[in-house]
Image (cartoon, helix red, strand yellow):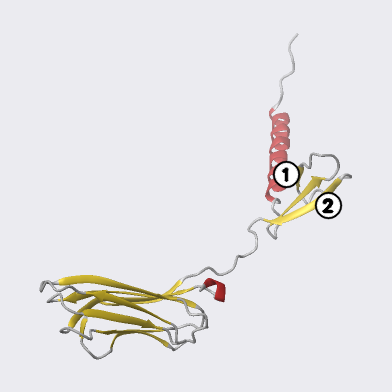
Amino acid sequence: MNRPRMGTWTKGIVVGIIFGGLVATGISWASIPDSNGVIHGCYKTRGTTHSLKVIDSAVTSSCPSGYTSLDWSETGPQGPQGPSLLQGGYDNNGTTVSSALQTVDTMTITNTGYYELSAKLDVDLETGLGDVSCQLLSPTGDSDTGVYAGNSSGSLAYGTISLLVTPSDEITAGQSVTLSCIEPYGPAAGIFDIKIAALEVGSVSNSQL
């Protein structure tokens, strides 16, 4: 016996039903998370295993018996502002210092806040004699001092001074950080590759100092 063949019109109905089902399924998937970016779920409160099921709130408006609703955001809340390097100064031209305290570089703070201040510079003692002392001074009055000690060999002495200050008080926009140096004993010393940086760190407590 010959089986009846499916006609073109019947095939079209079947394909349409299948396609419609796929589209409907796609719409259901697309609603998780919902239009506000919220993912809806239900977790089991009975027993020892608390399984979690994600639901489509457009289809299922509430959790079944024995489950409690639990919603969360797809993106989550925005976190606090992290630390960022506000600004930095770099002076490669260099200068010379002698027996009088001399400002070798400054940097102006552009935003009010709490900062960690740092400075680094290279020292050149042509004859190797003398000591170079430098101070990084915050507008709050906090400071750090570093010394590069030469030698008595009569030959070139070269070194680096690094300074770090963490003021406990807020620095106001427009105030300046100052780097000063002095060479009180020997001939003039060369100062170059001067760098000053300010890193915003948020409020600072006494326990952090």
Residue at x-position 85% and y-position 51%: 62
Q: How many marks?
A: 2
Observer-nearest residue: 104 or 65?
104
Give the SS element for disc 2: loop
Residue at x-position 82% and y-position 48%: 60
Above or below, 13 relative to 153? above
Sequence-wise, which precedes: disc 1 or disc 2? 1
Label 1 to label 2, Cα distance in Å?
A: 18 Å
Q: Quadrant of residue 75?
A: bottom right
Observer-nearest residue: 77 or 45?
45
- Mark 1, mark 2: which one is toward the viewer? 2
* Residue 80 location (% of width, % of height): 59, 68
Q: Is 77 placed left or right of 119 in the picture?
A: right
- Circle 1 residue: 24
* Residue positioned most to the top: 1
Q: Quadrant of residue 156?
A: bottom left
Q: Amino acid at mark 2?
A: Ser
Q: Is 159 placed left or right of 113 in the picture?
A: left
* Residue 145 location (% of width, % of height): 35, 79
- Circle 2 residue: 61
* Residue 184 location (% of width, % of height): 23, 86
Residue 92 visible, this orientation: no
* Residue 150 location (% of width, % of height): 20, 74
Q: Is 199 placed left or right of 74 in the picture?
A: left
Q: Amino acid at mark 1?
A: Ala
* Residue positioned most to the bottom: 100
Badge 1: few (under 14), some or many (20 or more) residues near its Cα, within 10 Å?
A: few
Observer-nearest residue: 149 or 173?
149
Q: Quadrant location of the N terminus?
A: top right
Q: Quadrant of residue 148?
A: bottom left
Residue 87 visible, this orientation: yes
